[in-house]
Image: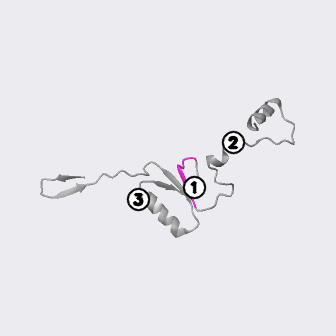
Amino acid sequence: MSTKSSGFGARRQLNFIELPFAGKTFYTDVKSSSLKAKIIHRIQSLGGQVETFLSKDISLFITDRDDKHGSGSPEETSGKRKSFVNTNVPLSRGKKLLNDEYTL
């Protein structure tokens, strides 16, 4: 914090605060409109931007909904590779090689 004096005897303080969310873009998926308004206000006061449509430009996604497919944490998914190929359809040689790699 520094003070700057003008020639007229007035003094003012200049506060340069680093905003932690500067350059971040948020999307909020919150059911409660009052809670959503509070979250948006807080994000903007910390320098972040809030988008109303979900797009590839979103840096962070905020939701209050449960994850129905598990948390997706690395601890849960490590070592569990799934086959991405339907086994009822005859496979080409290349797809079979890829499938074998993921089912080891």
| Rendering coords of residue 58 (x, y %) | 54, 50
Q: 16 left or right of 34?
A: left
Q: Which residues are magenta?
A: 56-63
Give, as a three-letter code, the residue at label 2. Answer: Gly
| Rendering coords of residue 6 (x, y %) | 15, 53
* The disc label shown at residue 79, or none: 2
* The disc label shown at residue 64, or none: none
Please identify, in this view, whether the residue under mark 3 or under mark 2 is nearer the observer. Answer: 2
The mark nearer the N terminus, 2 or 1, is: 1
| Rendering coords of residue 68 (x, y %) | 68, 58
Q: Residues within 10 Å of mark 1 (few under 14, many from 20)?
A: few
Q: 68 left or right of 25?
A: right
Please identify, in this view, whether the residue under mark 3 or under mark 1 is nearer the observer. Answer: 3
Tell me the residue that label 1 is attached to.
53
Q: Residues within 10 Å of mark 2 (few under 14, many from 20)?
A: few
Residue drawn at the location 12% of the way across and 57% of the way down: 9
Give the Cα distance between marks 3 and 1.
20 Å
Residue drawn at the location 28% of the way across and 54% of the way down: 15
The mark nearer the N terminus, 3 or 1, is: 3
Tell me the residue that label 3 is attached to.
45
Disc 3, SS: helix
Q: 5 left or right of 18?
A: left
